[in-house]
Amino acid sequence: MGDALWQLAGLFMLAFSAATLLPGGSEAALIGMAALSTHSISTLLIVASIGNTLGSVLNYGLGRFALHFQDRKWFPVSASELTKAQNWFARWGQWSLLLAWVPIIGDPLTFAAGVMRMRFWRFLFLVAISKTVRYMVILGLFDLFW
């Protein structure tokens, strides 16, 4: 039982960190755990989705306070990247968060939502849909071909 919880905690942390501005992915771990059949597909879906969504919440939170620190050396996003993300978000608006799952652009979108001070509950709803549907597709494809 203890090992099973550690496995889920590891999946949660991978999914969480994959959604932050740090590089990383959680898909391989998700598929690997599904292949081991130690946990139900629904459990894996819930754990990965919550972890990934909360990672995006961290980006949102960082974005809310980002402009206070953008002139500091340690600031993780360049001025040009920040401007690009803001322009993208201004052009496509809140619905662009349905693309929060997309590699490379998804994490900056969630950051930009914070910078643009989007309503949190709307942000959370759209991002949770995006992240969960992505994992549902991955697990569905796995189930189809495995």
Image (cartoon, helix red, strand yellow):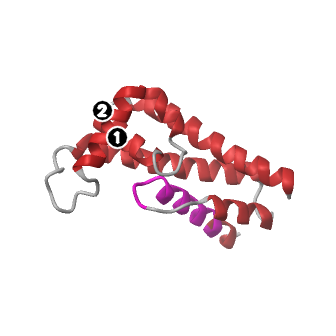
The residue that mark 2 highlights is 116
Q: Which mark is residue 85?
A: 1
Residue 13 included in the magenta stretch of the image: yes
Q: Amino acid at mark 2?
A: Met
137 lies left or right of 69: right
Please tell me which residue lies in front, 90 or 41.
90
In x, y percent, where is residue 97?
A: 48, 35
State the quadrant of the N terminus.
Answer: bottom right
- 48 w.r.t. 11: above or below: above
Q: Residues within 10 Å of mark 1 (few under 14, many from 20)?
A: many
Identify which residue is drawn at 60% across, 62% down. 11
Secondary structure type for disc 2: loop
93 lies left or right of 78: right
Q: Would you identify the image quadrant in which residue 28 lies?
A: bottom right
- 45 w.r.t. 3: above or below: above
Secondary structure type for disc 1: helix
Q: Would you identify the image quadrant in which residue 38 lies?
A: bottom right
Q: Mark 1, mark 2: which one is toward the viewer?
A: 1
In x, y percent, where is residue 6?
A: 61, 69
79 lies left or right of 35: left
